[in-house]
Image: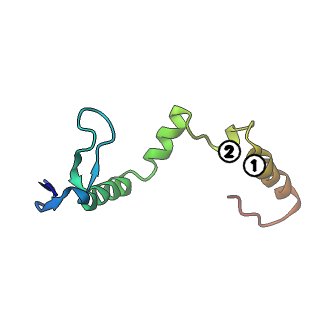
Amino acid sequence: MPKKKCPRCKEKKDWSEYNLNQSGRDKGKPITYCKKCSNEKLHLWHLAHPKRKTEQNHLRGINRPISEAKECSNYLGVFIAEKVLSKFFENISRM
């Protein structure tokens, strides 16, 4: 099996230690970093930008807050129910 050197950990690893490109001219070839380094890098990025993905998805319309998704069945079951039931019960914690 061919080996490739990861530029981050500087170790030579088999291609099975890498995620493979899924498209483009390099389809089937390993990506730049090994799986372990890729996961660490992604984890560090998410620690530095905790709300980034959610905010981007909201801006692009992929995901929206439940309060804006009136056509969604959860809107009635969650948002409206919380609003109405909070009038009748004390010490409600909204989700």
* Horizontal relation, residue 40 to residue 60: left or right: left
Residue located beneath label 2 in the image: 66
* Precedes in sequence: disc 1 or disc 2: 2
State yes or no: discs 1 and 2 in contact (Cβ < 8 Å).
yes
Q: CA distance from mark 1 to mark 2?
A: 7 Å
Q: As drawn, which residue projects farthest toward the front?
A: 1
Vertical relation: 46 (above or below) 64: below
SS for dot 1: helix
Q: Position of residue 88 (x, y in %)?
A: 89, 60
Q: Position of residue 39 (x, y in %)?
A: 31, 58
* Horizontal relation, residue 3 to residue 43: left or right: left
Residues packed near mark 1 inside 10 Å, few (<14), some (14 to 19) or many (20 plus): some
Q: Which label was assigned to residue 25?
A: none
Vertical relation: 36 (above or below) 25: below
Residue at (32% x, 36% y) in the render: 23
Q: Position of residue 48 (x, y in %)?
A: 35, 54
Foreground of the two, 83 or 40? 40
Quadrant in which residue 13 is drawn: bottom left
Q: Amino acid under label 2?
A: Ile
Residue located beneath label 1 in the image: 79
Quadrant into which the N terminus falls = bottom left
Residue at (28% x, 55% y) in the render: 38
How does the figure colour the protein chain or chains?
rainbow
